[in-house]
Image (spheres, rainbow, N blue to C red):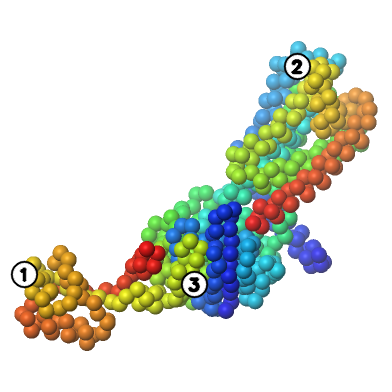
Amino acid sequence: MIVEATELRKSYGATEVLAGVDLSVAEGSVLALLGPNGAGKTTIVRILTTLTRPDAGTATIDGYDVLREPARVRGVISLTGQFAAVDENQTGRENLVMVGRLMHLGRRGAQRRTGELLEQFGLTGAMDRRVKTYSGGMRRKLDLAMSLIGRPRVIFLDEPTTGLDPASRSAMWDAIVELVRDGTTILLTTQYLEEADRLADRIVLLDHGRVIASGSADSLKTQIGGERIELRFTDEVQLLKATGVLDGLADQLVLTVPSDGTAAHLHHVLDVLRDNGLEPERVSSHRPTLDDVFLALTA
Amino acid sequence: MSHQGVVAACSDAVTMIDRSVRLARRNVDTLFASILLPLLMMALFVYVFGGAINTGTEYVNYVVPGILLLTTGYGAASTAMVVADDMDTGMIDRLRSLPIHSFAVLTGHVVASVARNAAATAIVILASLAMGFRPGGGVVDWLAAIGLLLLYVVALSWLAAGLGVIAKSVESASTLSFFMLFLPYLSSAFVPPETMPSWLRPVSENQPITPVIETVRSLLIGTPMDGNGTLALAWCSGLLLFSVVLASSLYRRRTGR
């Protein structure tokens, strides 16, 4: 496990932000910390990136203790915070070269890496413009590019797409997927279930500073119940008849039938309907969304 | 710190100085204000109030050393805002999560502040010559005056950096650093302290700015030194030491929560 945290606790005054959080991330995988505002996501990221000291608990990154060997940890990680940490009055290129030099790549090395990243993030055209002229999406991209200069092995992304329009969000997701392909370990926080579902190998659900569930998106969905088949009928009469032959919940013109998700079960449902002279207008199969999971677990 | 560590720390500092100077150069508002305001104040005192103030010398000669301190105080105070801006935006987290020496960030700002102040001071001196400032003093006197002003600016910039670190926002940084702008008015910068009411005189005579001004005056226009030089050096060195320790420990505390 390249990231390991045990029993992390943190309070600000009387407010307990983390109430004993354990988590671990396997090398090359993506972990999403999912939870509402105030769940403790950012505090976890700040502890793991050496910015905040936990009141109790331990954490290691690549075997280095975040409290005892912060300098080592900083050599392995990078952080992209909630607010794009870029200098408005420097150009995109100047921002990148600056971080490259702080990563001790040397003047030449910093420039070479800057060129690569500008290319990779499609910012070459804007590289000599001051960042204050950039759109929100471009800023985030530059921010992420700045995090990648030193080829970190673990990247922390704190709400990487909050406040972005759908097109920029999708571009950001593509960039993250690209990183994963290169074998980078990613720990991201998000309030968006779709984002966690789409990007993460494992999801940790946080609420009030506690882990309330964890696992793959699929396993979380299975935890709160199986799949269902939705049958839409053209009129009330058919719906009523269908309710007589199948167990399910009728609402409007739709009958929802619990399912195990197999083709055999779907066949069986359709056969029963045909045997009774019923023909649904539409058939669809649904799995619970992470929204369902979240509501079920935090309710 | 190992030899390699020292080299790395210096390289970090150079990178951060590079950044801060570039940002300072592009922050036109601040640059403009830190030059224009002292020029306006000088014009105001020389042409408007000066006629009514009796200092025993040409008033322009009396007031210019004070204006120079006002200039540097104003320029240093804006450092508090620049530092607060770093703290307020996510920039400080990025810098802090990089494997760099924590001293580098503030050093960058302080050096940029000194550079900005040097430029502003040079412009103010040129303008004062045009307004009739006729300094005396040889090369050594000038070097000594510049050296003292430099020490004063460095000390004040570190103090401003410290204030920037604890300020919760750019606005509160500006409020916190207000006293830096105000202190020169309570010194011998514009009027001799002897003309002040008896309760105010001790304040004026025993605050750090008065000996610095009197020393610069003595070096440039030949007023008596009266031990002000030593006092000024002591104040500035003390302030520098205090400010560096304060700023670094505040920085570590604020960023290490």
Q: Chain of mark 1?
A: A
Please provide percent x and percent y for residue B41: 70, 25
The chain letter under disc 2 is B
Q: Amino acid at mark 2?
A: Gly
Q: Position of residue A168 (x, y in %)?
A: 42, 60
Tell me where residue A284 sits by quadrant: bottom left
Observer-nearest of B163 and A88: B163
The residue carrying mark 3 is A31
The circle drawn on residue B50 is 2
State which quadrant residue B70 falls in. top right
> Marks 1 and 2: same chain?
no
Question: Looking at the picture, which amino acid does disc 3 mark?
Answer: Leu
Name the chain under label 3.
Answer: A
Name the mark nearer the viewer: 1 or 3.
Answer: 1
Q: Is residue B228 above or below residue A65?
A: above
User: Where is mark 1, residue-wise?
Assistant: A237
Identify the residue at horizontal 75%, vertical 47% (top origin). B246
Q: Quadrant of residue B172?
A: top right
